[in-house]
Amino acid sequence: MKVSIRPQKVSDAGRFLEILSNPNFNFFHVQEITLSREVKFLKKNEENRKRNFEHNYAILADGVVVGGCGIKIDQHRPYIGEIGYFLDEAKNLTTVLYTKMNTKTVSYMRS
């Protein structure tokens, strides 16, 4: 399995909606999610990146969007960033991290 990231695109909205709407998805609080809200969020990505507020990426497994990750920059201390991510339950990437990428530790953050 090839895992990669790329900047999020507005065309990812439907796939993100599918992942975030899964009833088993309870690790990441999302307000009532709709396609229009997701599109609105994704359209802000370029401006947020330019202003160094946040940098958001799609996580892909074999070219298919399986989640998202982002870095929120502390505006008072711009050398500090908070990283978060979410994954489709069907793609357990922690297995890949531990076995194929030889990762020793994976940290989970709940908001």
Image: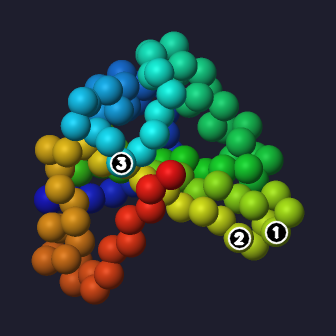
Crowdedness near tag 1: few (<14), some (14–19) or many (≥20) residues, C-alpha within 10 Å: few
The residue that appears at 54% across and 47% down in the rendered structure is 56
Q: Is residue 98 above or below residue 28?
A: below
Asked if residue 63 can be seen in this view, the reply is: no
Residue 24, labelled with which disc?
none
Q: CA distance from mark 1 to mark 3?
A: 27 Å
What residue would you read off at disc 1?
A: 77
Asked if residue 71 can be seen in this view, the reply is: yes
Give the x, y percent position of residue 80: 71, 70
Of circles 3 and 2, which is in front?
3
- Whether the residues at callouts 2 and 1 have beta carbons within 8 Å, the answer is yes
Name the amino acid type tagged 1: Arg
Residue 27, labelled with which disc?
3
Name the amino acid type tagged 2: Ile
What residue would you read off at disc 2?
A: 80
Q: Label 3: state its secondary structure.
A: loop
Give the x, y percent position of residue 92: 17, 56
Q: Is residue 92 above or below residue 10?
A: below
